[in-house]
């Protein structure tokens, strides 16, 4: 099977920076030109840096073994409770039997700081509401369009604004992850009544915005991020009217942000929000 089926979609950029994140600029990626990203493109001098963080190599419960011969992993399928399937379809293996990034070369092999070989599954909730003018009670307008707001967290690891979200635990459904991560990262120290209100809000159902590969700076040739993004819209503002947001878990800040075209967020989050804006401004 060739990788040509995986060339559809965007070319990853954020996982081809000069240095691997969280390494204090000590681990350098081999630079990969745009025309050499695809595995189908000849690149005879491609010798990527091999890097897996010490933290991952210590073998925390959420990480695979580094020695594939002792792991007995089942690629492209549900491996006990660990989902090793990709949203993009079947992925190939490299000459060492390691999963091969379906979006192409990144300049680094190994797992970096990701726990799983192959896809590392996450879920990202996008909680939105209309921005209301407190003096009139009407929806604010900008350039002739209503203004959307979304809940954004400030990540502690890179000091970038992002959507709340996180990794899907083994055996956990995406819907469970979406609620759990929102509560953990955006509602720390909230009352039980507030958390029940949000649980009720999530239970009303959301709209899936995206399911697939994430252009994440942590990606490597053998480990990469994938996510499911779901939008939960508080249409009349009743659910979050009296709920105060407070950052928790890995977040060091949280706030409602206006959804504007010039937003710069972590990984592919700006792309997800563009799709959310299109959904609501098209009247859905």
Image (cartoon, grey):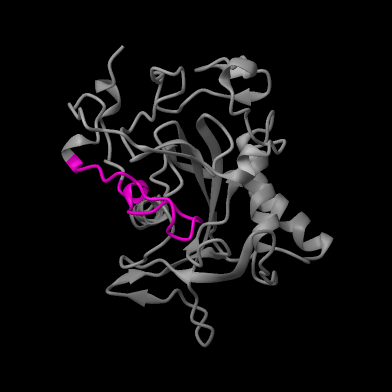
x, y (%) of residue 211?
45, 36
In front: 59, or 37? 59
x, y (%) of residue 69?
59, 15
Asked if residue 59 lies left or right of residue 224, the reply is right
Spot the residue most to the right. Answer: 192
Asked which quadrant contains residue 18, the reply is bottom left
Asked which quadrant contains residue 73, the reply is top right
Residue 239 seen from this side: no
- Seen at 41% across and 61% down, the residue is 265
Q: Assign the magenta stretch its main secondary structure.
A: loop
In front: 12, or 52? 52
Asked which quadrant contains residue 212, the reply is top left
| Segment tinted magenta in the rendering | 13-34
Asked if residue 207 lies left or right of residue 196, the reply is left
x, y (%) of residue 125?
55, 50
- Seen at 58% across and 51% down, the residue is 165
Asked if residue 283 lies left or right of residue 176, the reply is left
x, y (%) of residue 217?
42, 50
């Amino acid at each position: 099977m060739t990788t040509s089926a995986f060339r559809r979609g965007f070319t990853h950029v954020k996982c081809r920076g000069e240095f691997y994140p969280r390494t204090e600029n000590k681990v350098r990626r081999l630079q990969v030109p745009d025309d050499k990203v695809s595995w189908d493109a000849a690149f005879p001098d491609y010798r990527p840096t091999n890097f897996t963080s010490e933290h991952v190599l210590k073998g925390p419960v959420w990480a695979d073994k580094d020695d594939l011969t002792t792991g007995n992993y089942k690629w492209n399928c549900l491996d006990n409770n660990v989902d090793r399937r990709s949203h993009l379809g079947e992925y190939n293996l490299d000459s060492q039997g390691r999963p091969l990034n379906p979006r192409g070369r990144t300049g680094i092999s190994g797992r970096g700081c990701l726990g799983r070989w192959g896809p590392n599954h996450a879920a990202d909730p996008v909680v939105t509401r209309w921005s209301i003018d407190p003096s009139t009670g009407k929806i604010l307008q900008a350039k002739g369009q209503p203004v959307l707001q979304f809940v954004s967290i400030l990540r502690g690891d890179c000091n970038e604004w992002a959507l709340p979200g996180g990794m899907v635990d083994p055996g956990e459904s995406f819907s469970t992850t979406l609620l759990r991560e929102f509560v953990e990262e955006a509602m720390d120290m909230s009352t039980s009544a507030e958390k029940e209100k949000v649980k009720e809000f999530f239970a009303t159902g959301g709209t899936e915005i995206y399911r697939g590969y994430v252009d994440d700076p942590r990606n490597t040739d053998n480990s990469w991020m994938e996510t499911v993004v779901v939008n939960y819209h508080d249409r009349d503002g009743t659910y979050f009217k009296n709920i105060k947001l407070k950052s928790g878990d890995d977040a060091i800040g949280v706030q409602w942000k206006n959804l504007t075209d010039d937003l710069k967020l972590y990984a592919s989050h700006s792309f997800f929000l563009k799709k959310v804006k299109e959904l609501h401004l098209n009247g859905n």
